[in-house]
Image: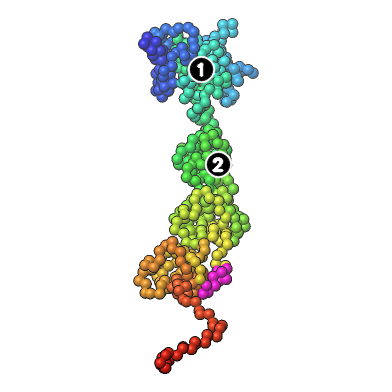
Amino acid sequence: MANSSHDDAYKEKFRPNADKALESEVEAALAGVSMDELYSFDKPRSAGAAATPGSQARKGKIISIGKDDIFVDFGGKSQGVVPIIQFEDVEPKVGDEFDFIVDRYDEREGVLILNRKGVVSGHVTWENLEVGQIVEGTVTGANKGGLELEIKTMRAFMPSGQVALYFTPDIESLVGQRMTVEVTQFDRAAKNLIVSRRAILEREKEEAKTKLMLELAEGQTRRGTVRSVMDYGAFVDLGGVDGLLHISEMSHRRGRHPSEFVKVGDLVDVKILKLDKETGKLSLSLKSAMPDPWANVESRYPVGMTLTGRVTKIESFGAFVEAEEGLEGLLPISEISWQRIGKVSDVLKDGDIIKLVVLSMDPAQRRMSFSLKQAGPDPWAQAKETYAVDSNVTGRVTRVVDFGAFVELEPGLEGLVHISELAGHRVRSASDVVKVGDEVQVRVLEVDKDARRISLSIKKAAEAAAAPAPAAAATTTPAKKKKRPELRGGLDWNW
């Protein structure tokens, strides 16, 4: 229990005065982690040690610029020197004012050794440490809540949420790397130090965004990194500026969710559709940066051409089939099979690879249609020869209607038995005589190949089966009639 109170007292030293968001993050990172576990310090710390503020940033004026150093005046007799290399991002001039952090005092030269605020401090110590100071350190370990760093001779802790701009699942991979970080909190007495790399990255991104926004224009194609994927699209970082890539602009092909097209970390080439420089909002398109699959489609897929496609979506009226990525056409239900089908899903399913024939093409409307049945043999082509008039054949009842029944002779080839041809007696309802699935004998009455109609008769097939076979012709002479013997008494019965 005593150890718990000891740890809680030290965690209070990490509570900032102003940044509530960072306070919550540090508390979450330190939850259940002791100070000894966090830093692996050998020396015990006093729970009652009070934090002492470091030196504050001071505004100074440039009074002279040398080859390697710049001299700064703070007023009175206070002057300092700062390396000119710390002004790579700006062009300093005499009279300019900047914020500086005192690194140390050079007694021999009688000047302050300075670091420009926001640049890496080369000689940071516990004595000249300051919130907001930029320092360099090496990652020495990773634990439950973040990274351990060594900065000069000081140990520091960086919460996992402060490591990068975006969530980094594998922070252990950063062990051994050297990185630039910003001091966010410290306790000089207890030698506790909290740093952030994210704060630096956010400023760099904001600077890059300002510069990039001047360069961006609608119609440009830029390379970016997918940072997040949502239900409605994805956000792409173009190098400091995030833009929205809506799902409708991800691909020419059909898709249900953005994750089917992109994932976090992907490098993509996108086209800028809309740009609002005042708000910084961008609308991006991935498919507009790709070749248009409908370009020259008439020459690549002429009407009558046979091709192989993939079923992408099933509808009640047919199926959509992809000929190539982004190029889809409709396969109407009437063109799926030569035989009648109830539902498209009875024949096809998503992902099926099928052979098709191009029926129609309209590049202006980005529409094309296919036929599946015409890609196979037409059963009606030889119907007249296969099913001669007055021949009897066997078929299966596929539909029963008010005016008769349809009988399938082979897949894709149906004929009609009119109600008057169902039986030799009067029929009130076709269902009184046949039902779907029945196998029946029918006689072919008529074949119209052009109209794709066959007239059949169950009645005539039954009559033909019931008729007696014709009698065989006599080939022998009749036997002679025997003469009856005469009866006794002279009587003769042959009168």
User: Residue beneath label 2, please?
Assistant: 270
**Residue displayed at 49% across by 13% down:** 39
Above or below for 324 versus 13: below
**Residue displayed at 57% across by 44% down:** 289
Above or below for 234 versus 137: below
Residue closest to the far left: 428
Callout 1: few (<14), some (14-19), or many (20+) C-alpha neighbours within 10 Å?
many
Which tag, 1 or 2, sits closer to the chain's start?
A: 1
Q: Give the position of the C terminus as an image quadrant.
A: bottom left
Q: Position of residue 101 (x, y in %)?
A: 51, 16
Query: Magenta span has 73?
Result: no
Q: Give the position of the N terminus as an image quadrant.
A: top left
Amino acid at dot 1: Glu
User: Residue beneath label 1, please?
Assistant: 148
Query: Magenta span has 389?
Result: yes
Amino acid at dot 2: Val
Mark 1 touches mark 2? (CB < 8 Å): no
Q: Position of residue 484 (x, y in %)?
A: 46, 88
Residue closest to the far right: 67
Nearest to the observer: residue 377 or residue 181: 377
Q: Which residues are magenta?
A: 382-391
Q: CA distance from mark 1 to mark 2?
A: 38 Å
